[in-house]
Amino acid sequence: MVLHIFLRQTGDRLQKSHPQIRPHWFDYKKCFYNFVNTLHPATFNYDIKFNIIFDGDLTGTFTENYLNNPITPTNLIQINSGGESVAGNIMWRFIKEQYEYDDKDIIYIVENDYVHAPGWVDVLVGLYESFDASYASLYDHNDKYFLPMYDDLQSPIIYTKHCYWRGVPNTTGTFAVKGEWLREDIDQHLAIEGDFHKFKALVETRAASVYTPMPGYSTHCMNDLLSPLVDWEKILNETTK
């Protein structure tokens, strides 16, 4: 089993600030270094292939600085899309047409505004070692606890040696998928825009499962939508010293 990671990054021009929807401690550079530091190969024994998909001008960016002295062997895929949805399509087409992976492998797509807790690699791989899961996210979606549309949500609960996991009907654009599922679903990832609609289709037409840990091992950095019960500011600061 190989963990294939596609971390999506952009040049400064394409980064979305939106300070009104971000926690006061949010920072793209810190999110990047939080990810690569918690991915440090000395802390686990898995075969990992780390890809950065960079959209825009790399010159002078913190991503370029990292690539000059990477912690983990890194493959750079540079694109110029000019927009998030176009960049996503370029990524999926690259994976479909040019990238090799096995059915038992895990493919993890990561957007640039997430924080990860130390140990997330073991947690994610542990799920797939223990269960025949199709999709997973490390983000414990806060909206599932308070939005009226989820009032009647009934979630199956499973556990691994690391944590409990709950089944959810959808997730964001940051998720993991088993290779055999991605091979069958990749055309839907190319065709359907919007995370909610994409996973609605996958769950309904493919009987896909989506699992998330409780508490979360990552969070989307959006006010009112942080994974609950975790001090994400503290984690971000401690992993980027």
Image (cartoon, helix red, strand yellow):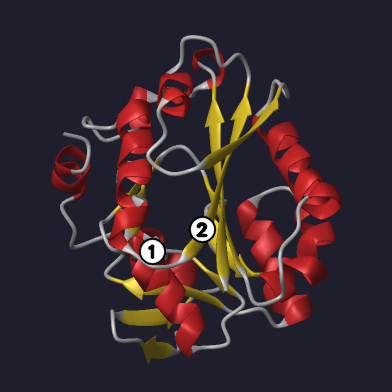
Foreground pick, 44 / 239: 44
Q: Position of residue 191 (x, y in %)?
A: 83, 52
Disc 2: which residue = 48
Name the residue located 29 percent from the left edge and 60 percent from the top edge. Answer: 43
Decide: is 125 above or below 72: below
Tell me the SS state at disc 1: helix
Is 97 above or below relative to 137?
A: above
Q: Secondary structure at mark 2?
A: strand
Q: Quadrant of residue 86?
A: top right
Q: Residue at x 62, y 58 (%)?
A: 196
Give residue 81's quadrant in the image: top right
Q: Is residue 159 visible?
A: yes
Per the image, the residue denoted by label 1 is 121
Q: Is residue 141 left or right of residue 100?
A: left
Please indicate whether residue 210 sits to the left or right of residue 78 in the image: left
Disc on the earlier residue, 2 or 1? 2
Q: Residue at x 42, y 34 (%)?
A: 70
Asked whether the residues under the numbered discs 2 and 1 touch, taking CB atoms below 8 Å apart as contact, a structural biologist would say: yes
Residue at mark 2 to residue at mark 1: CA–CA distance: 10 Å
Give the image location of residue 68, x and y in percent: 45, 23
Characterize the local packing of mark 1: few (<14), some (14-19) or many (20 or more) Cα atoms within 10 angstroms: many
Q: Which tag is nearer the camera, tag 2 or tag 1? A: 2
